[in-house]
Each structure stands twice: as structure tokens, then as C-alpha cells.
Amino acid sequence: MNDSLEILTRMISPNAGLFSQELAKHFLAIEFTEKEKRRYLRLAAKCDDGKLTASERIELEHLVVLNNLLSLLKLKAKKTLHDQSHAA
């Protein structure tokens, strides 16, 4: 795990505390656009081929960090909704 992901995991603490139900549903609805998904795939392929420019590498790294952040938020959102549905 890289430093950014470790920091994000600690800050969000997916297994501790819960979001409101409304906020949890909001986070679960957030998605990258199709254009962003295609861009990520193109950059990842260029990375695999060793052909990324310096600016493309930075862009790819940002997309990965954002995806990690969104994944952590969604994990906590799912836990929130699961726990709330079992508490009722």
C-alpha cells in the first residue's frame, strides 16, 4: 500500500463510525464518467508499454488516488447502509 492510500484509509477509517444514510447513498452514486474511464484505460495501457510522458504519469497517478479515495468512501457507505439495515 502506498503512503497516500495509507493516509486516506486512516483518515476515512472505513470500519469505524458511519455516514448518514443520505450521505452513504450519495457516495455510492458517484462514478467516473465514461470519458474518464477511457482516459484511464489509455494511460494504463501506455504505462504498461513504458510510453507515458511525465505529465501523463502524473495524470494517471491522480486518477489512481481519486479511485482509491472513492473506493474507500464507497466501502464505508456500504458498511453504513448494511449496519443501519440490520439495526432496524
Image (cartoon, rainbow, N blue to C red):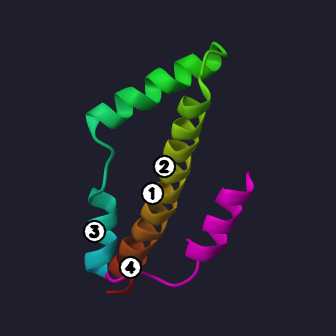
Considering the image in quadrants, where does the C terminus appear? bottom left
Depth order, front residue of 33/13: 33
Q: Amino acid at mark 2?
A: Asn
Return the disc, 4 or 2, that comes first in the chain's sequence. 2
Residue 86's label in the rendered image is 4
Q: Check whether the beta carbons of the residues at disc 3 and disc 1 lie within 8 A of each other.
A: no
Q: State the SS at label 4.
A: helix
Q: Nearer the viewer, mark 4 or mark 2?
A: 2
Q: Check whether the beta carbons of the residues at disc 2 and disc 1 lie within 8 A of each other.
A: yes
Residue at 33 percent across and 44 percent down: it is 32
Q: Is residue 1 left or right of residue 56?
A: right
Q: State the SS at label 2.
A: helix
Residue at 30 percent across and 56 percent down: it is 30
Q: Check whether the beta carbons of the residues at disc 1 and disc 4 lie within 8 A of each other.
A: no
> Within 10 angstroms of label 1, few (less than 14), some, or many (20 or more) residues?
some
Return the disc, 3 or 4, that comes first in the chain's sequence. 3
Check disc 1 and report the residue beneath it. Answer: 70
Q: What is the span of residues highlighted in magenta in the rendered image?
A: 1-20
Residue 24 versus residue 70 in the image, above or below: below
Would you say residue 13 is visible in this rendering?
A: no
Residue 60 versus residue 83 in the image, above or below: above
Q: Amino acid at mark 4?
A: His
Q: State the SS at label 1.
A: helix
> Where does the image place residue 53, in percent across and percent down from the top left?
59, 24
Q: Nearer the viewer, mark 2 or mark 3?
A: 2
Check disc 2 and report the residue beneath it. Answer: 67
> Within 10 angstroms of label 3, few (less than 14), some, or many (20 or more) residues?
some
Return the disc, 1 or 4, that comes first in the chain's sequence. 1
